[in-house]
């Protein structure tokens, strides 16, 4: 059975959060700041791991899920949907642990896998935001409440040619 050493896990996780805080756009920094604070508390101040399945872990996962959903609704970022999916799966794993008697190894592995999916989404989203800003694009745009202007498509082509779509 392969086990990732805790020091390596904490180093990679800390590096991802640091990268997001330093190079990310506003949504990346906001989510990384929240998750980094929870991660620091959970890893160092209150090092509670897989000794019991509690509402404590479920509460943390729901808080992260709600924050991710709020950012996904506010910002036009693809990676927020992937991160929210990982949060849904992590929360579902927490709920399943209350219903189904899961072994600690199974429960812990599932939480770690969903956490790494979240980290991968945050890393690629931060990279895309950073590169977008370097290329002169504004990746921190909000979702627009007004629909975009229609493109010149089939109907516009017919109007230019003098024909109608009625026949």
Image (spheres, grey):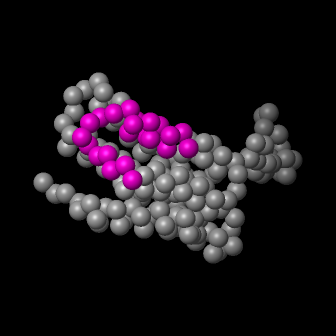
Q: Quadrant of the N terminus?
A: bottom left
- Is residue 142 among what the camera can see? yes
Q: Residue at x 25, y 26 (%)?
A: 100
- Label count reads 0
Q: Quadrant of the C terminus?
A: top right
Residue 33 placed where, x, y %? 54, 57
Which secondary structure dominates the residues rendered in magenta? helix
Measured along the vertical axis of the image, is residue 13 above or below residue 100? below
Residue placed furthest toward the left = 1
Left or right, 42 with reference to 28: left
Q: Which residues are magenta?
A: 45-67
Picture quadrant where residue 98 is located: top left
Q: Residue at x 46, y 50 (%)?
A: 38
Residue placed furthest toward the bottom = 134
Measured along the vertical axis of the image, is residue 101 above or below residue 139? above
Measured along the vertical axis of the image, is residue 33 above or below residue 150? below
Left or right, 60 with reference to 112: right
Residue placed furthest toward the front = 45
Q: Residue at x 29, y 31 (%)?
A: 97
Residue 70 placed where, x, y %? 60, 42
- Is residue 88 among what the camera can see? no
> Magenta stretch containing residue 62, yes or no?
yes
Q: Residue at x 21, y 28 (%)?
A: 101
Q: Nearer the viewer, residue 79 or 95?
A: 95
> Magenta stretch containing residue 46, yes or no?
yes
Residue 140 placed where, x, y %? 67, 59
Residue 131 placed where, x, y %? 58, 71
């Amino acid at each position: 059975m392969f086990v990732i050493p805790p020091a390596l896990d904490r180093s990679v996780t800390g590096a991802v959060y640091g990268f997001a805080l330093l190079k990310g756009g506003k949504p990346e920094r906001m989510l990384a700041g929240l998750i980094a604070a929870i991660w620091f508390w959970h890893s160092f101040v209150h090092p509670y791991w897989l000794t019991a399945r509690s509402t404590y872990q479920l509460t943390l996962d729901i808080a992260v899920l709600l924050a991710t959903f709020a950012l996904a609704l506010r910002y036009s970022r693809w990676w927020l949907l992937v991160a929210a999916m990982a949060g849904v799966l992590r929360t579902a794993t927490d709920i399943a642990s209350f219903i189904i008697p899961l072994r600690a190894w199974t429960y812990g592995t599932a939480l770690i896998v969903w956490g790494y999916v979240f980290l991968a989404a945050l890393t690629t989203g931060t990279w895309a935001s950073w590169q977008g800003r370097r290329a002169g694009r504004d990746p921190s745009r909000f979702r627009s409440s007004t629909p975009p202007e229609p493109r010149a498509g089939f109907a516009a082509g017919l109007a230019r040619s003098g024909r109608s779509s009625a026949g």
